[in-house]
Amino acid sequence: MSPVPGRSGLLTMAPIPKWRRVAYPPAALPAALVAGVAAAVLVPWDRPGIGWVLAALVAAGAVFVVDRRARASVEQGESTGDRSIRALLRHNPARLWWTALALALLAVGAVRAAGWLFVLCVLAAVFASSLAVVSRRSVHGIWYDAIAVPLEASAAVLWVSEGARRARDARKTRTWRAGLSVGATVALLAVFAPLLGSADATFGSILNRLVPAVDTGSLVRWTLVSGAVALGCLGAMFLLAGPPRSADSMPREKVSGRTVSRWEWALPVGALTALFAAFVAAQFAALFGGDDYVQKTAGLTYAQYARSGFGQLSIVTMLALAVILTVLRFADQDSARDRTWLRALLGSVTALSLVLVASALGRMWTYQQAYGFTVLRVLVEAFELWLGLIYVLVLAAVVRLRRAWLPRAALGTALATLLMLAILNPERLVAERNIDRWTNGKTLDTDYLSTLSPDVVPALDRLPEPMRAEVLEPIRDDLPEDTWQSWNLSRAAAR
């Protein structure tokens, strides 16, 4: 959406309300309503299903069409400055990346049945869609950018109200006639569809599948879903029309307040590096010494040793990350010698922290081999893998001594890690690994497996009867019938 002519106030803190500073395309409200109605019809409220990604595609298409038409309608008369802003918004590959990531996360609902996994994917898709709209770093920071669309929904309502009031008189007659046409269409369908459905059982069953049952609960659900999606679309269109100020447009300023000199930060960071180095040396001894070495030095079995240190290592790596980022933020970088020391010490402690992350992962894997795999333990491992990836990004930031790109990269890798976890099918992975342990003579917790989703059903074919039936029966009892909106590949395969 292109700004109105002479909107230089977009890049300054103008005292007038924001919704008066950006152009309002007349198609914004109808497009948001279409997306809201589509979501009410398509989204299965109580389970993962294909309807979630279909509704997202409709919403994304509505925003894209309105944005594209609004830009084209003012392209001829815009100023040079407005044209440059429009070009900046259009040629932005980051927008395509975040949009694709959001749609991929919602598409998980069409292939995985685990409810907890899909809830995480929906929340992640909200963040990704907001970052697709605010595709360049704003002056407000990553937390605003990740939830900018819902935050700006209230301003978007005022924007739509003001724009609709200005355009009401110009299109009053056309709107009235269009309303009559829509009303007549709804009335005709409401009369003839039930009659035809009652006249033929086959056609009636088709109507029953296409049109969900109407009751108080359904009406409340439709209202909530359609309202949330419509507001989200309006917020996205509003931000596209008047994007927040880019961080790149602000003058570069030195860090406010007092910086920390090399002699102030080098001593504690150097001591931390030495401590980590000693710990890593001991870790290598335990790793290559095996179970006998651990029993002699710690008095524990290798599995007990792995369990006892995982939590502490996780806390240490997260605290070390905070220390590294704090020093990188406040350390004095004026001289070449300061920058060399900063790269050397922070690079060393970051590399050693990567070894600690690898040690924590190894401990968790050893513990699971000894005591069994669970979804929670797999999630912890996924988190540790992501933490290791964050340390790689931090190492790159330390080498470059630039950290402005780091927050978006960290959030992007977190969402991508969640998507990869969904692709791996964590519940089936847990079932397969536990069955592997059982085939090697260890116990199998069938009660735990029976609490998982239909994602695990293909892995259960390796179990003999009646053990397989014992696990399958609770899963089968909780398996709901799907409509076309809630179709899910995992549930369909389980049936």
Image (cartoon, helix red, strand yellow):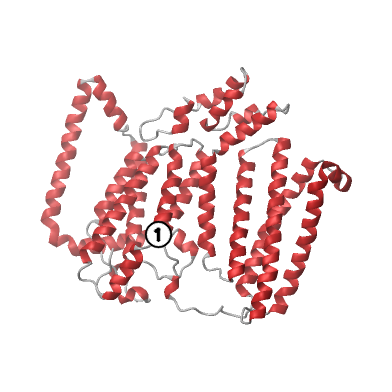
**Residue at 31% of width from left, 64% of height from top?**
241
Name the residue at the top extreme: 465
Residue 24 image position (x, y, % from top left)? 25, 63
| Label 1, residues with CA under 10 Å away: few <14, some 14-19, many ≥20 | few
- Seen in the picture, residue 52 relative to 213 is either above or below; the reply is below
Q: From where the camera sits, is residue 47 visible?
A: no
**Residue at 72% of width from left, 74% of height from top?**
266
Q: From where the camera sits, is residue 489 visible?
A: yes
Left or right, residue 80 beside residue 348: left
**Residue at 42% of width from left, 27% of height from top?**
481
Name the residue at the bottom extreme: 335
Front residue of this view, candidates 432 and 453: 432
Which quadrant, please, contains the N terminus? bottom left
Q: Label 1, on which residue?
A: 93
Residue 303 image position (x, y, % from top left)? 77, 41
Residue 313 image position (x, y, % from top left)? 72, 53
Asked where in the image residue 282 lies, by quadrant, the reply is bottom right
Give amino acid for label 1.
Pro
Front residue of this view, candidates 47 and 56: 56
